[in-house]
Each structure stands twice: as C-alpha cells, then as structure tokens.
Image (cartoon, coloured by chain):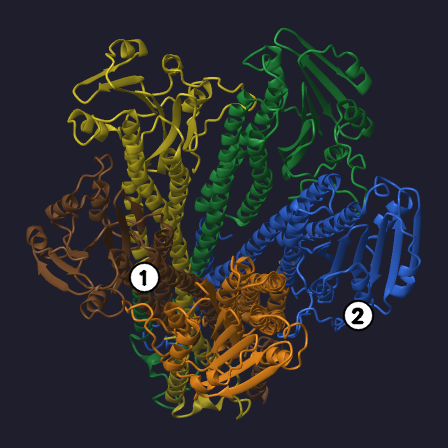
Chain colours: A yellow, B green, C blue, D orange, E brown
C-alpha cells in the first residue's frame, strides 16, 4: 500500500510525547560515531549513548548515526545533550513524516525518505537528520546502509569532506539519499520497458496488474520525491549561519538531481498511463479479432447448416410432386455441394472486402 | 452525498440574522466550562449560559464548550458577553461552512470540520472555535467528543497546556481536530487495500460501487482537508497578538500534519483512479475470456454440426449413384468420425497457436 | 447550450456604441426607485426616466432598478444623469458579459449573473450594477425578482441597511445574487443524488444523457461562479473610497459564500465524472452478464445438437456393421440421453467453477 | 492540422535575415495608406513603397496597411523609413509566430492571429502591427479584410477615432481582431449543439470524426486565444509613452473580450469532452442492445433446435421399446410443439424479468 | 525509452568526481577551435588540448568545440585553463542532465539537449556550453554537427556575429539548438497528420502502437523543451556582466522560439490524446458492425434452421393423424419455403427499422 508507515500519534496526544514505533524493525539499537577533522579521524560503534559520548575528543565534526528507533531513551539522551527540540524528537519516532526541513534556534531538523524495493513494491524508510554546529545526528530505522559510501569518503579523506564542516557532511548525506532514487528509477524504467514490450507482443491478464503496481510505485516515489526537492531547495535558500556559502553551491547540485528525479517520475507516470491505454486498445483489438473469427465462421456455416437441414426434412415426396423433388434429381447431391461452395465462397469474398480476413 | 450540510441562509436574508439549524442533532444544549491556570482547575457542566458564567473565578484561561446549536439564545448571550461579531455567530449556526479563519478586532473565529464515518459514508460536523484573550469558545453539533483527550491533558496537568495561555489551548483543540483525520484516512487506506485485493482476485458487480463510494469519501475528505491546511497555515502566519510565538512553533507542527493528510488524500485519489482502471481492465479481460470460450466451442462444433447435417439429408440414393454414395460405404460412419476428429483437432491446434486456449 | 447569450458587438463596431439586445425579454421597461435614509423611505415605480428622477428628494441613498434593456434611451439618460462611462453602458446592453468589476473615476461598474433553471437547463441573466456616491443603479433583463428580499429589508428597516450608505446596499444586492446560487446548487445536488441511485439500481439509456445534462449545467454554474468569486474578492480589496470599511467586513462574508459555491461546483463536477465512470462500468457489467448467458447456453446446447445431428444421419446400416450400430442397440436412445445429461452437467460444473453462474 | 503555418527559419540562420514566405498567398503586394487628423483624411492605395510615402502630407496619424508578404523589398524599405528593428521584420515574414507584443526603443511590435474557417477546419493568418509615434503599420497575408469596419469608422469620422492618436488606432485594430473570434466561436457553438443533438438522436460512424474535428478547431482557437489575451493585457499594462491613458481604458475593454473568448473556448473544450463521453456511452449502449437481441433469440432457439434434432435421430425403434417411443405416440407431435412453446415462454419470461426485453 | 541517458553517479560518490561516460559514442575526441575578431579568423582542428591552446593568438573570441567525452583528461585540462568549476565539469560527463543554466563566479555553465530522430524514436544528446569572458567552450557527445551553420556565418562574416563578443556566439549556438526542435516537430506533426488519416480511413492493430510511439516522442520533446525555455529565459534575465544588453534582445527572440516550441508540443499532446480517443471509438464502431452482421445473420437463420429441424423429425405419421400431417400435404414443401421467406423478410424489415442494415 502507498502509506509511508502506519504511525501517527493518537489524536489529542500532547505534542512532543515520545513513544517508540509499534513495529520494531531492528533487534538492537546501534550507535556509530565518527569524529573527524582534516588531520584525524576517530570512529567507534557502541550500544549506549553514554559510551558514545564518553569517547568524544573535540574534533571539528561529530557524526552520530543511530540505527533502530525502539529505544526512546537513546533519543531522549541525545536530545538533551545536543539541545534538540521536543517536537523534532517526536517526529523522529513518528516514522510516517513527509520529507521536510525545520529550522530551530540552533539546529536544523531534516526528514528524508529512503526507498527499498521489495517483493510488495517499494518500502519506505524515514531518515532523520539533525544538523547543528559541529555535529550531525542521523537516525535510521533499519541497518541497510546508504551512508557507507560517505563513511568511506571520510575514512580515505577523499574529496573535500574532511576539510569542511558539519554542513558539508549533512550535504553529503542528503546527496547520497537523493541519488539513491536513481537506481530505483532505473529499475522502474527497465520494468516499464519490459511492460511495454509485453503489452505490444504478448499481453495477458497479469499485465494490467503489473502496470497497476508500477503506477503504485510511482505514486510512492512521487510522494517522496516532491517534498525532497523542496527540502533541498529550502536548505539551499535557508537563512541560517549553519550552512556555509561553499556548501550551498553543492546543495544546488543536489537540487538539480532532485529536479531530475521528479522529472523522471512525472515522465514515467505519463508513460505508465500511455501504457495502460495501449494495453486497453490491445485487449480491445484482440476481442475484435476473436469476434471476427466467430462471426466469419458462424456466418458461413449457419446458412449452410440451414441448407443441410432443409434436405434432411421428411416431406412426403410421394404425396406431391412439389415435395422436395430435388432429393430425387440425378445431380441433386453434387448440386447441393456446389451450392454450398458457391455460398461459402461468396461470403468469404464479402468478408475479405470488409477486411475481416 | 458530498454536501457538508444542507444549511444556507435564504438568499437575501439580512447578514447576521441568527436562525437555528433546521435539523436538531442533539436533545439538550449542554455547556461545559473549564477554567484553569498553572495551579488550579475548575470544571463544571451546565445547561444555561447564566449558570456557566456565574461560576467563573477569573483564572488565566476559560474554555466554554457548547454542544448543540438549536438554542439561539445561548449563542446570543455568549456573543454579547465575549463581544463576538454577529457575522461569526451566524456562521456558527450555518453549519455548512468551509473551514476558515477570520480575524475580528479582538478575537479570531475559526471553523473546522470533523468527519464521522457512518453507514452512508462520511458525515461532516462543523466545529466553531472563538479564540480571544483568556478565553476559548467551542461549538459542536453533536456530543461525540473529540476534545476529551485535551480535557484529560488539562485535568492531569500533563504537558505544558496548564502553563500556557488560551492560544495554546486553541492550538491543542485544532491539533486534535487535524489529527482526527488520521484514523479516518487509515480506514480508507485499509478499504482501498481490500478493494485492490478484491479487484485482483474476485471482482463482482458491487466492486465498482465500492470504488465509487471510496472516491466520494475522498471528495469529502479533500473538501475538508484543503481548507483546514489553509486555516492552520493562516493561524501560524496570522499577524495577531492573540497567538504567541511559542504556540506558533506548535502550529507549524499541526501544519505539517495537515499537509501530510492532504498528501495522503491526493495519493489515495490517484490510487482509487488506478483501481478503477484496474477493475475495468479486469472486467474487459473477463469478457474476453467468455468470448473466447464461446468462440472456440462454436467454431469447433458449428462445422461439425454442418457435417452431421449433410449426412442427415434424404437425397434419393437410388435416383443416382452421385447422391450421397458415402452413406453406403463400408467405412462410411467411421470415416465420418475420423473427419470430425481431424477437423476438431486442426481447429484446436489453430486456436492454441492464436493463444486462445 | 453553455453560452451565456449570443450577444456580442459586430467586430469592428466603435466601442461605446449602444445597441439594444436583439431579443426583447420583457414587454415594457419598468423603473423602480427607492430613496431612503435612516428615517424616511420613498418608493415609486414608473415607466420613464424623467418621472423617475423628478420625484427625488435628496435622501441619503437612491436605488434605481431598471427591468428590461430594449429601451436604449433610458440607459442613455441615466448614464448622463449619473455620469456613467460609455463603455460600461455598452456592456449593460451586451448581455453576454462575464461577471466583472470595473472601477471608473467616480463609480464602480459591476456585472453579475443570475441563473434561472428551466426545462433546457440553466438560463443565465445578466445583472448590471452601478455603485456611486449615494446611488445604486441596477439593470435586470427580466422581472423575475431576486432583489425583493432586499427591498423588504429596506421597507421594514430591518438590520442595518437603512442606517448605512449605498455601498452597503450594493453589498446587499451582490450578497443576494451570490446566495442565489445555493438553491440552484441544492437542486443539482439532489439531481446528482437521484442519478447516483438510478445508476446503481436501474440505469437505462437515458441515464447517460441526464449525467451529460448535469455536467453541462455544472459548466454553466462554473463559468458564472469563478468570476463572481473574483468580483466579490476585488470589491473587498478595491482601493476606492466608495466602499467603507464596515461594508468590507460584510463583503468578506459574501466572499466566503462565493468560495463555498465554487467548492461545491468543483466537488459536484468530480462527482459527475465519478458517476459517469460508475455508469460505464455498470453498462459494461451488464454486457458481460448478457454475454455469459449466451455463452453458457450456446456452449451447452451446441455440442448436444451436434450429437443429435450425428444420430440423425442416414448412413446405410445394412451396408456395413460399422455404420451407426448405436442406432440398433437396445439401450441406444437412453444411452444417448445419458450422454447428453452427463455432458451438460460437466459443462455446467465447469462454468460454475469459472464463476459464470 | 493544428500548425499555424509551416514557416520557421532554418536552424542556424542568422537572426534578422529576411526571407519571403515559401507560399505566396496573394498575387500582388498592395499598400493602402490612410493619413488623418480630426479635420482631414487622405486615403490612397498603391503598389510600391515609394509612391506610398511620397504622398504623405504630415497629418496626425499615418496608417499603412500592407497586404501580401512575398515582396521582402517593401518590408525592408518600410523598416528603414520607420526605424523598425530587424528581428521584428523577420518575425513579420515568419508567419508561424505566436501572438505577442515586443517593445523596441521607439515602437511596439504586435503579432496577432486571425482565424478563417474553411473546409479543413480553421486556417490561421498572421497579422503584424507596428505602433510608433504617429504611425501604425499593419501587415496581412491575404486580402480578406478584417479592418474594413475600422476604415469605415475613420472615413465617416464616427466615434472618437479621428480625434485620437495612433495608439487608439492600434487599439481599434486589435479590438476588431479580438472580436473576430466571436463569430468563429458562435459557429463552433452551433456545431457543438448540432453534434449534441446528433449524438443523442442518431449517432453514426462519422459523428466521432466530427467531434474530433471540433476538438482540433478548439485547439487552434485556444493556441491563438491564450497569447492574445496576454498581448492585450501586456498592452494595457505596458510602461510606454506610446499608449495614452485614455486608450488604456479601452484596452481594458478589449481585454475583457479576450478573457470572455478564452472562457468560451475552455467551456467548449469541456463540452466536447463530455460529448465524446456521451457518444461512447451511446455506442456502448447500442452494442448492448444488439447483443441482447442476439442472446435472446439464440437462447430461445438453440434449445428448441436441439429438441428438433433429437426427434430427427434414426434410432432403430424396432430394436428396442426404449428407442424413441415418443415418435410413435398418438399425441407425440403436438406434445413436442407444446414443449417448445412452454420452453420458449419460460425463457421469454426469464428475459423479461432480467429486463432484457 | 524515455530516459535521457542511463548515466548517473553512483549514490554517495564525492561530488566533482570526473568519470568518463560508460558508452563511448565516438572513436576519437576531436577539438575544433575558432578564434576570431571583426577583422581576422583562425580555425584549426586538433586531437589534444595542448595543440589546441598553443596556437591561440589572442583574438577577441575563442570558441573551442570538443566532440567526444570519453577522454576525461581533455576536460580536466580545459577546466584548469579556463577556471571551470569542478561540479560543472562533472555534469558535462553525466550526460543525463536536464537543460539548465548555472552561474559560477566568472563563467556561465549551460546544458542544452539535442534530439536526433532514429529508428527507435528520439535519441537525446547533451550539449554543454561554457560562456566566459572572451571564450565559449562547447562539448558534444557525437559529431553530427548542429553548429556548422554558425561556423559558416563566422567564416563568411555574415551578420553581426564577427563584430560581437562571446555572449553573442553563445546566443547563436543556443539559438541554433532551440531552432533544431522545429524540424523534429514538423516531422512529428506530419506523422500525426498521417496517423489521423490512418485512423479515419484504415486503422489496424499497429495504429495504436504508432500513436503510443508518437506520445512517447512528445514526452521526450516535452522533457527537453520545458527546461530549455527556462534556460533561455534565465539567460535573458540573468544578472551577469557576461551577457551584453544587445545580446539580450536576441535572447528574447530565442525565448519566443522556445515558447512556440513548447506551445506546439502541448498542442500535439492534446492532439495525440484526441487521436487515441478517435481510434478507440473507431475500433468500438467496427466491433459494433461485426456484431451486427453476426446478429442479423444468426437471428435470421437460427429460427429457419429450427423450422427445418422440425420437419426432419421422424414422428411416426402412421401412429396418429396428428403426427406431422404437414409432411403429407400436397403444398407442404412450397409452404415451408414460403414460411421461411416470410419469416426472413419480417426479420430483415425489423432490423432495417432498427437501423442495423
């Protein structure tokens, strides 16, 4: 189904109430920390916030990556340490958020969504990111790690990532999230291509279901892609000292990507609609063909059968010379066949002319 | 039907004329009052405005909740006491209003709608809210109480609600109204999921009616959700001293929720459309299948019946050796069967090739 | 048809040329005048402009209501007396105008439309209103009077209408025009409800025509409702001393109504579309059902008829023991019936399984 | 086809290159000049620019109307005389321009389109207008003259046209071009009305083609009407001393007309779509009716034919008393007929109940 | 398929990483240089950047045109020489970019797309343009040269191109890219015209596939045309000293063209949709016709066959005078034929009345 997740607070709940998601999508909460500056990098992975914070040594950027949201305590502790707003913390746990960016006094709260293709279509994971001065916090629901490539870049000191601040780290994470749409779109594009071939060459009853599934996946994609474009655009234009000028140039690049993704989603949507039209016409055409075969066959044999029925009648030939004298003719039977062939031939010619054959 | 309510003033009626709604949806008007500050809470429920107002003791926030609109007097008295604008009072009684917010000199008038699912689809109730300095007035048509959770929070002093002013109370009420869409949407989502399954696995004649009903419910939802988003957004941005800065942060949160609701409504609409397409294709496919069976059966048996008809003819075999000599052959009948089987086999092969079997 | 009226000036006509409408929709031009202040009210109805103007006694507000447009002279005289712009006068006569508001130096020119349901659908009448300092002029095509309720309010001094100026009178007239949509919409809503029932329970060939008519009426409504919303909104925001601050609050109320009307029109349009889909599916389903009955019946009897045809053949049983020995069996005929029943039963079972019965 | 004209410069051509249109739509270029002031009017029509310019006597307004575009020289000379921009001159010759207005330093360049209904649908002509201080140049492709009424007004000194400047002349020309849409729209409206009747009463195979043609014509209209509205609106708001304040009031009137035209185009588009839906349902309904007749007839006679087939079988009655004893019954044949009638009656009753008759 | 190209960076790749496109679309990278001023023109074509730069002699404008993107080194060297931003260079290689314009400190980066029709539909090539002070760099994927006409204009010193700066050169290139859409659109228009004829006169099963292909091509066109319009508009309004005032006038002209292209694309889209509707109705009508033939034939012969079946029955005429006495009548057989003819005639008349013949 197209819902992001079934989680929403009970209506009337006090805002800012932290409640763990109902479905526990990971066994153990795991906290990974990277602390780095241009010269040095520390990296460790622990299970509790205390351990995580204890080893900090004050390098330029701290990135704390939490996987698993069922432990409200972890969130609460991090919230207190870094001064995160209670409403933002609540949204981390309500995993059905739309992608958005919210500016609080000394940090930005960014929600992005990651799409995992599985058997039922696209599953959606919420990634929450806090960007503050010198720190970035990320919260993932499941450990399938989209951030590994960024970690690699930090480890190897590739590119400018080690030289720049937390804003660039946040950009890099967002960029990897945005770019993650591309392979998903490629998959969908390939599926649509296959479907197109299937529709043209050999559509069966399941084809329309597949088109429906593709359209549903495009709805999911679109619901995620539209607000993500807004998020990246808002970050680029955000009036905040947290994001430096140099990073904004890169955010423009990420914005380009997100526009491109949207563009592809919309094109694919149009394409899927066109595909459905094509499918329906094809089915209609097939029906037509079936009907024609039936009509041609029936039209030819129904009169012939009537003729045969005639000469199967038992009118008493002895009662009158007018009663079926044909039955006694010398050439009666051959003439009957001749009549049949002529009739059939004439009908075939007629249908040929009507272009039904 | 998709009308909010049939109530509108007779064209040409003087604006500000108070007339009770035609349909009395509750037996007795009931007035519930909560008066509270950080330290103290008074709560009582009475039947007349005089009683309601007499017990006020001047705490920070007064919340008067009126259930039942048929007693115009109640409205009139409250309007005079709190200086409410006549046009706003009229709108309280004309229960077909779109959600809106109107700024009067010293109070805000807010109309929201609450959706109750019942057997015929979604029924819509108008909730009118007045927010003034130190007071909040709410008017409900029926007692089914969406505000109970807020009352509970006030009673238990949970969260910040007791410490803050009437603006926060109004926010809390609006938030609970907005959030009330979520379970309705969840229901609809579940219904659509069931319908999808039904369409794929076993669509019958009632399925399309169910899809139609779902689309109608989505229309009702949409008509309520679009303006409610605007209401929350307008409140957040409203240039009024009645709403404090702190409360605006919370309104932004409510705004997020209302956007999410709209987003889901739009996605469900797309989904329902796709579902209808799927249904129509499925029906089309079934028709095709039915046609194919008929065509295959008829195509095979019509020629055979003709053949049988031939040898049922009574041409006088004695009149000529050309008249149906087959009837006198030693292997005539077996040969006839052989011909039938060959013909049927050939046709079956042909249909197999055409992929009709 | 969806045209407002066929009237437009011949291309190239000099602007401001006054020409009476081709169709004379009323016998005699009739001019009704109300002159009033808080204390006093004069009211008279005459046939010529001279009489009309002669009796004016200089009270605060003069309302001249002209019914019937074929007398260009009347218009010309009023135009000169009140200094109305020539282009506006031309538009009064070209009765196919869209609702609009135009600001001239010392008066506003407002065009509204009134919808009268008749047998062919909705007929549209143009109402032109001039608002100047101390006067309001209204021009109606036909006497069916939508303004009577306003006149009553003036006569009885109800509400604030007698105390306020010409701007409030103009508001009251516009408000009654806007509110006049409500009963029309109610009618349409009821028709759609009936149609929905008809589609679900007993659609026939005329149903789709009725849906088409409803859609056409909605087009007419929409064409009138969209610009009227703009008119009311423009009046509320118009930068003119002709409309006082107090009246603007009331215009906001009228604006709310016009938005509500549009909202209902759009919802009804969606509903009519959904209704058409429902109708088409229902027709499709019926076709399916018809096809199934034919297919089941034909599929059962065609093979049986073939079988009967077989044993009607005249193969010469004496020519060979292989020729139709079944005909001579002791249980031949009963066996034939048994075979028929078994075959029919098997086919019925098959169709049952395919869910066709 | 819906193309305005096939003309476009070869890609890569230097901008401002003047090349005559490929298709020569008029034999001889003809140049008509009107020079007038409040008191005097000179009018002459010649074949070359030199003659045209030689007779000018310096009155307030000069209007040069060129019919036929194949003589590039004419354009070039006029361009030099009046200081027209090379890019604008190029656009005069590239007759596939969208309606637009372009401000050059001391003149405005306006492109409008004129629609001529012909057998294949709507043909589109480009009218180019230059408005400068004291002069107006117009370029038409074909001589079918839409400006004659304006010329008449100048000749007879009707209205204010002789008293006002070149801006008013340009307005008058544009107004006559805008108003020229009305008769075209009236035609289309009448066609749609006829089509509606045809669809309801007697649709045949050509009906859908006619609806398609109407939709194509509406596309052409829309492509011309949208940008023309923008042109008139831009002229009204243009920040240029070339257009006086008085003329702007008249442009607002022309703008109203163009909005009305667009409004009608959009409504007709909706109507045409609804008409197509109606047509498709009607066709669907007819198919249904055909199917029902076939089904009822076949359903009744197929079982009867089977019955007749039974008693045509040749089971050897002498071989066994069980072999078709019915054939020897005294009431056999009448009983057979009775059975047939009962069966047929029962089936007819069944179909009656199913509402198929 | 509708993808611009399958290239996108692996998610998480450091931004600015240069990687050659996977598909090498040209054998050898070739670099063409034109250096020119009003008086002089140097032109040479080489294979390496060193050679290219070595021969520069400092004329006013340098245009370096690189064909083939697989040699990252070339890009890197040019980037360093002209100070191009790393993100822009990356986008040159990621050939799936949307058309866009990006302003860097001292140069503009412009991406355009060129459409090449081939057998599978429209193929899309990315053209990247850098505009700096005194230089223009262009990067093409394949050598099919759209810029040759511009080169010719430079060589022959035609127009103003040699007199003006690099901004005009960039305009000329962009203009030739924009105008390149026209022949593609002409082709599509012609295809749609042919399809329309085909649909009306002789639609077959492949027609709908062709319509689908045309719609896909329109999607590709639209995806390229929308952002290109924005690019040209952005260039015209860009606040940069790189583009002179005189050039902006020309850019406005290019903008007009791009709007016209979009306009045609949108109109063609509407047309293609209308064409599909037309096709579906035509198919529906044909089906109807087929059904009618079958129904008429079957309706006539089924009762006749039943009648013939009757008189083929073997009721024992000797057992009773009621058993098929007709068989012994003198006029029995002729009467049978008469009955057949009357029945058939009556049915034909009925069908004639129903307008089925």
Q: Residue furthest front?
A: D58
**Is C216 on the left-hand or right-hand side of C27?**
left
Can see residue C160?
A: yes
Give left or right: position of E108 versus D328. Answer: left
Which of C273 and D100 lies nearest the eye of the viewer?
D100
Q: Quadrant of the N terminus of chain C?
A: bottom right
Q: Is residue D69 left or right of residue D279?
A: left
Residue E25, x across and y down, in percent: 15, 56
Q: Position of residue C293 (x, y in %)?
A: 52, 59
Position above or below: D19 against D351: below
* Front residue of A54 and D91: D91
The residue that label 1 is drawn on is E178
Residue lying at the far top of the rendered structure: B39
Residue A327 is tagged as none
Residue at figure coordinates x 60%, y 68% from the top left: D340
Please provide percent x and percent y for residue C189.
69, 50
Q: Tell me whether the residue at label 2 lies in contact with that at label 1, contact meaning CB atoms closer than 8 angstroms.
A: no
Task: Say what secondary structure mark 2 lies in.
Answer: helix
Residue E267, quarter of the rendered image:
bottom left
Label 2 and label 1: CA atoms lie apart by 55 Å
Image vertical order of residue B329 relative to residue B197, above or below: below
| Disc 1 crowd, CA 10 A, few/some/many (<14, 14-19, 20+) | many
Residue B112: x %, y % from top left: 63, 32
On whether disc 2 and disc 1 are found on a single subunit, the reply is no
Chain of the residue that carries numbered disc 1 in the rendered image: E
Q: Is residue D324 visible?
A: no
Please count the marks in the image. Answer: 2
Apparent side of residue A206 relative to residue C248 in the rendered image (left or right):
left
Query: Which residue position is annotated with label 2?
Result: C72
Q: Considering depth in this image, is A83 or D325 the residue closer to the camera?
A: A83
Q: Nearer the viewer, mark 2 or mark 1?
A: 2
Q: Subunit of mark 2?
A: C
């Amino acid at each position: 189904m197209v819902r992001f997740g079934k989680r929403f607070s009970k209506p009337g709940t006090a805002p800012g109430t932290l409640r763990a998601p109902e479905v526990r999508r990971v066994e153990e909460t795991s906290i990974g920390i990277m602390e780095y500056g241009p010269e040095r990098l520390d990296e460790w992975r622990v299970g509790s916030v205390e351990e995580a914070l204890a080893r900090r040594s004050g390098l330029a950027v701290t990135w704390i990556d939490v996987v698993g949201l069922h432990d409200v305590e972890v969130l609460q502790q991090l919230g207190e340490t870094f001064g995160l707003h209670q409403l933002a913390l609540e949204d981390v746990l309500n995993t059905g958020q739309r992608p958005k960016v919210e500016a609080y006094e000394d940090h930005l709260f960014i929600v992005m969504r990651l799409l995992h293709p599985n058997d039922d279509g696209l599953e959606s994971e919420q990634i929450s990111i806090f960007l503050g001065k010198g720190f970035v916090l990320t919260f993932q629901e499941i450990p399938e790690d989209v951030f590994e490539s960024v970690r690699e870049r930090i480890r190897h000191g590739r590119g400018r990532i080690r030289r720049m601040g937390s804003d660039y780290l946040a950009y890099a994470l967002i960029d990897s999230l945005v770019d993650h749409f591309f392979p998903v779109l490629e998959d969908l594009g390939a599926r649509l291509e296959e479907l197109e071939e299937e529709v043209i060459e050999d559509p069966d009853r399941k084809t329309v279901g597949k088109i429906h599934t593709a359209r549903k996946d495009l709805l999911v994609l679109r619901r995620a892609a539209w607000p993500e474009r807004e998020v990246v655009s808002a970050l680029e234009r955000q009036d905040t000292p947290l994001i430096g000028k140099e990073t904004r140039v890169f955010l423009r690049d990420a914005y380009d990507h997100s526009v491109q993704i949207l563009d592809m989603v919309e094109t694919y949507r149009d394409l899927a609609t066109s595909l459905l039209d094509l499918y329906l016409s094809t089915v209609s055409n097939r029906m037509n063909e079936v009907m024609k075969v039936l009509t041609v066959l029936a039209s030819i044999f129904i009169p012939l059968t009537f003729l045969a029925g005639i000469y199967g009648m038992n009118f008493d030939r002895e009662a009158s010379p007018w009663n079926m004298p044909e039955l006694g003719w010398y050439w009666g039977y051959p003439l009957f066949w001749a009549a049949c062939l002529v009739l059939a031939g004439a009908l075939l010619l007629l249908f040929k002319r009507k272009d039904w054959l």
